[in-house]
């Protein structure tokens, strides 16, 4: 339906006169009087809407209405006392509130997996009509689509024992966002608002419009996190909030007049522009302590009229006289009023435009202007002429560009030159001219040479960009830099260049050594800045980031001592940040993550490390304790749940190394519970789907290792079913297809160790065929080559064990041809050792090996076994390495017995002794089913 133009809208003098007449009548007589008034249809619609607002306001002050109607009082059964009831994993321990449609109860998680609190909305008895049930279900589906750290999360849903639906929400304790802003600097208020804007933008991307944004629906927690309350539930539970125009209008389009958009007040269809207007009202309130319209309104009707009639004042123009009687202006705002002048005035007035078309096109665009303001860039809410853009550019680059601009002025005007020379010393003038030359040369290069290179392809363009930028930065950093802002800018530029050159965590140009040099330069600059401003937390954050990058680079290069040093420094900086802001959830998680990285260099069961097992395990146990405390305070936050999965998996790996499989199982149950909770918040989220099926695979392994074979195999099959569902939904997604193959192979390996060779063969074949298809479709993915080699190796072995020597021999020869270069050398690492052992098993077992080939085959296999046994002997605490060495010796001995019975028997005995020692200590998993044991 098109919105009416201003020419179609009724005159407000007529609206007010007719409203005053009808408001004096009993409600039952108003409709007839309105029809008899002879007013136009548009005028009647406006008056009818205002009468609804007025009735809502009277209801809020105790005059009856929705919450106190006879239907609610006499037709609905009495509400059950749910204290002590258990709903799913939650036990109710108190009533938080009661509204016309439902009740909200506080609850404690009570399933033994984790501690946590929640708020549970239960539909009231007697309200379970088909329409209400559909609305309740719609709210649940809407909430399930939202997964954002600043939106209260849906945790669970179900029905009570008496058949009423309920929704479990994250428990949020905090203050309304306007109250939380009192006394804060403008930048901190904007930072809070940007959290809210991100949440609303997320909802819009999920095709949801909030329609009732107001301070009571936006809380700020004690650790400074904004939480937007659930979509729909707050309106259903609390339709009336007060008598000063805050009443939420009941009906099909609920809203709060003071925060409603003009189109809402007129009863027109609403869209994302409605939320943008309400965000503008909230920001105005957050920055000034006042609403943009209706500051003196004493009723919902008057507030709604003001939304349509009043033009908001520029925030910077507000005075004590303009705020209305009895309304105090925020004293912090009065002290910094000039901050709002200009950009923030324009941003707010654009968001508050009466016409939806005149507002920002999206919440992201609104937020982008605020971020531009904070960073000193031009905003779109004003005509960005050349002079305005120049002022912003100079403001961001006070030293470099500012002095260069003075140099340009000096060249252009002789009078300016004389003034400049009189004020600036010769050394500063020379520096300014050099800076201006650099800026001009850099600008010309970017405009012409890099643009031309980009036309030749993205790689050539990036190479040119890196070369040009490094020349500029190296000349700049060769000077003695003492300006803090310039030091920070140059450091950040070196970091970006290093990322492009060879950051191992993202797409890059494949030049890791050059990247490390750039990162080293960035680190030196940040350390200089730390001497100038030791308490600058923003620079501490930069030091953390660059040390972590250097840790990644040195670890990838195999320099483990350097990696430990850099990760240790990153942890030190992360700890400083976490202690400075103990209520900042992200900083607490970052510290835990930094400590995990540092511990993984000390010891990592499945990768190269410094071998400091005891130190690393103690650190991981401490981190689990820290994380458990954090989880108890933020039991529903997705970022907390996600961090826990990786940490608990790392702990489980240490437990498996120690041969403590029951403890590993308990840890994997916890990790699986976190993944399940994540997916319950947003069932269609591919990331959380992946997280859950990976957790299912790990838990399935733990079940098998403790002897619960049936449950373990069943859970592996469930994990694979999830992977298949994701892979089928997007056949072109190579990663999803590879994850599916990564499910087939481990299940086959477990079945192999259990001696169930026919089943193992079937799963190995499925894995192998999928990897071959993927390799054909994605030849550029190098990781697929290694995975296919592993699959061919395992499948060849399984063909042999299943009594299919011809198939085993054919596949092994194909694999040998692919790995010809590697076969020319004796095995030098664990992976090569495994290939040599399986190759000997297959070729000797299939027969037809010439004598000279047999000797070389056995020599490589013995060398491989020696590598595995040496690794096990170096780590006597490592049950996994001991098991691998024992099984390898037994398998090679079995192959040798066909030509040298005595040597084969001796090897088998050696392997069995190692396995029996594990079994005696209780460190042998139940998946190892060996006849001789």
Image: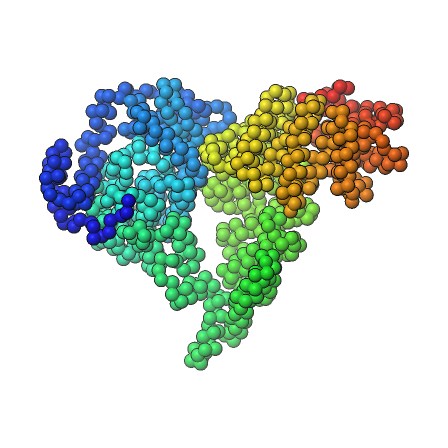
Residue 828 x %, y %: 78, 41
From the viewer's perspective, is 786 left or right of 164?
A: right
Residue at horizontal 54 percent and vertical 45 percent from the top = 574
Q: Nearer the viewer, residue 335 or 279?
A: 279
Q: Can residue 168 be seen in the rendering of this structure?
A: yes
Residue 135 x %, y %: 33, 31
* Residue 195 versus residue 792 in the image, above or below: below
Q: Nearer the viewer, residue 142 or 236?
A: 142
* Residue 335 versus residue 258 in the image, above or below: below
Quarter containing the N terminus: top left
Q: Within the image, what quadrant is residue 797 found in?
A: top right
Quarter containing the C terminus: top right
| Residue farthest bottom in this picture | 414
Q: Within the image, what quadrant is residue 337 found in?
A: bottom left
From the viewer's perspective, is 376 left or right of 15?
A: right
Residue at horizontal 58 percent and vertical 30 percent from the top = 720
Residue at horizontal 56 percent and vertical 36 percent from the top = 727
Q: Nearer the viewer, residue 560 or 129?
A: 129
From the viewer's perspective, is 40 left or right of 787?
A: left
Q: Can residue 566 be seen in the rendering of this structure?
A: no
* Residue 486 versus residue 24 in the image, above or below: below
Q: Within the image, what quadrant is residue 519 found in?
A: bottom right
Residue 914 x %, y %: 77, 26
Residue 250 x %, y %: 25, 35
From the viewer's perspective, is 597 left or right of 800?
A: left
Residue at horizontal 13 percent and vertical 32 percent from the top = 28
Q: Nearer the viewer, residue 532 or 247?
A: 247
């Amino acid at each position: 339906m098109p919105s009416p133009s201003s020419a179609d809208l009724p005159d407000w003098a007529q609206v007010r006169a007719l409203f005053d007449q009808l408001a004096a009548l009993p409600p039952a007589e108003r409709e007839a009087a309105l029809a008899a008034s002879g007013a136009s249809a548009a005028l009647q619609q406006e008056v009818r809407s205002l009468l609804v607002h007025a009735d809502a306001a009277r209801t809020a002050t105790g005059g009856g209405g929705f919450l106190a109607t006879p239907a609610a009082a006499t037709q609905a059964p009495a509400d059950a006392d749910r204290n002590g009831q258990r709903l799913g994993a939650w036990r109710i321990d108190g009533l938080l509130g009661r509204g016309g449609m439902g009740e909200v109860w506080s609850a404690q998680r009570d399933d033994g997996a984790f501690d946590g609190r929640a708020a549970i909305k239960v539909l009231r008895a007697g309200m379970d009509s088909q329409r209400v049930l559909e609305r309740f279900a719609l709210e649940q589906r809407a909430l399930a689509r939202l997964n954002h750290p600043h939106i209260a999360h849906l945790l669970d849903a179900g029905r009570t024992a008496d058949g009423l639906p309920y929704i479990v929400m994250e428990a949020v304790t905090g203050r309304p966002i306007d109250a939380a802003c009192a006394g804060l600097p403008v930048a901190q208020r904007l930072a809070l608002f940007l959290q809210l804007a991100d949440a609303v933008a997320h909802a819009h991307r999920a095709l949801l419009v909030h329609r009732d944004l107001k301070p009571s629906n936006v809380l700020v927690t004690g650790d400074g996190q904004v939480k937007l309350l659930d979509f729909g539930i707050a309106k259903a539970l609390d339709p009336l909030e007060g008598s000063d125009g805050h009443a939420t209008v009941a009906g099909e389009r609920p809203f709060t007049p003071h925060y409603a958009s003009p189109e809402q007040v007129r009863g027109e269809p609403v869209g994302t522009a409605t939320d943008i207007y309400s965000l503008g009202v909230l920001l105005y309130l957050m920055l000034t302590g006042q609403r943009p319209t209706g500051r003196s309104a004493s009723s919902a009707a008057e507030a709604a009229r003001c939304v349509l009639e009043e033009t908001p004042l520029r925030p910077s123009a507000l005075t004590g006289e303009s705020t209305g009687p009895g309304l105090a202006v925020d004293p912090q705002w009065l002290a910094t009023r000039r901050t709002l002048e200009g950009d923030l005035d324009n941003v707010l007035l654009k968001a508050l435009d009466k016409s939806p078309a005149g507002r920002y096109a999206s919440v992201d665009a609104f937020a982008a202007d605020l971020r531009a303001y904070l960073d000193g860039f031009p905003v779109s809410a004003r005509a960005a002429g050349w002079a305005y853009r120049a002022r912003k550019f100079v403001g961001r680059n006070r030293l470099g560009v500012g002095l260069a601009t003075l140099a340009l002025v000096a060249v252009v005007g002789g009078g300016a030159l004389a003034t400049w020379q009189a004020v600036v010393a010769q050394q500063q003038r020379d520096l300014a001219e050099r800076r201006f030359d650099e800026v001009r040369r850099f600008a010309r290069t970017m405009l012409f040479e890099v643009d031309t290179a980009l036309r030749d392809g993205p790689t050539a363009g990036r190479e040119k960009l890196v070369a040009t930028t490094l020349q500029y930065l190296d000349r700049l950093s060769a000077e003695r830099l003492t300006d803090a802002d310039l030091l920070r800018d140059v450091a950040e530029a070196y970091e970006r260049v290093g990322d492009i050159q060879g950051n191992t965590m993202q797409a890059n140009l494949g030049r890791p050594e050059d990247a490390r040099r750039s990162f080293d330069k960035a680190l030196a600059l940040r350390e200089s800045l730390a001497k100038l401003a030791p308490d600058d937390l923003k620079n501490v954050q930069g030091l953390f980031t660059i040390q972590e990058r250097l840790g990644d680079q040195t670890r990838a290069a195999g320099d483990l001592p350097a990696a430990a040093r850099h990760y240790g420094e990153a942890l030190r900086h992360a700890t400083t940040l976490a202690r400075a802001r103990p209520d900042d959830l992200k900083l607490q998680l970052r510290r835990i993550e930094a400590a995990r990285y540092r511990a993984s260099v000390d010891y990592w069961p499945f990768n190269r490390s410094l071998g400091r097992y005891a130190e690393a395990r103690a650190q991981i146990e401490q981190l689990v304790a820290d994380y458990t405390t954090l989880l108890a305070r933020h039991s529903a936050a997705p970022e907390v749940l996600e961090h826990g999965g990786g940490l608990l998996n790392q702990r489980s790996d240490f437990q498996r190394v120690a041969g403590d499989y029951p403890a590993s199982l308990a840890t994997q149950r916890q990790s699986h519970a976190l993944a399940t909770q994540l997916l319950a918040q947003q069932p269609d989220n591919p990331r959380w789907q992946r997280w859950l099926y990976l957790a299912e695979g790990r838990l399935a392994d733990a079940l098998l290792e403790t002897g619960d074979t049936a449950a373990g195999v069943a859970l592996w099959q469930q994990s694979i079913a999830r992977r298949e569902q994701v892979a089928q939904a997007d056949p072109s997604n190579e990663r999803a297809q590879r994850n599916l193959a990564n499910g087939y192979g481990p299940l086959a390996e477990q079945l192999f160790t259990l001696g169930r060779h026919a089943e193992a063969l079937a799963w190995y074949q499925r894995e192998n065929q999928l990897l071959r298809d993927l390799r054909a479709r994605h030849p550029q993915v190098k990781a697929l080559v290694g995975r296919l080699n592993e699959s061919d190796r395992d499948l060849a072995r399984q063909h042999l064990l299943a009594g299919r020597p011809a198939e085993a021999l054919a596949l092994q020869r194909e694999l040998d041809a692919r790995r010809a270069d590697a076969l020319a050398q004796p095995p030098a690492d664990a992976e090569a050792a495994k290939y040599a052992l399986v190759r000997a098993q297959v070729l000797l077992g299939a027969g037809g090996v010439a004598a000279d080939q047999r000797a070389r085959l056995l020599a490589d296999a013995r060398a491989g076994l020696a590598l595995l046994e040496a690794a096990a002997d170096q780590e006597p605490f490592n049950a996994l390495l001991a098991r691998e060495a024992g099984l390898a010796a037994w398998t090679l001995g079995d192959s040798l017995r066909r030509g040298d019975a005595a040597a084969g028997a001796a090897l088998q005995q050696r392997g069995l002794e190692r396995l029996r020692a594990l079994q005696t200590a209780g460190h042998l998993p139940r998946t190892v089913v060996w006849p001789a044991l």
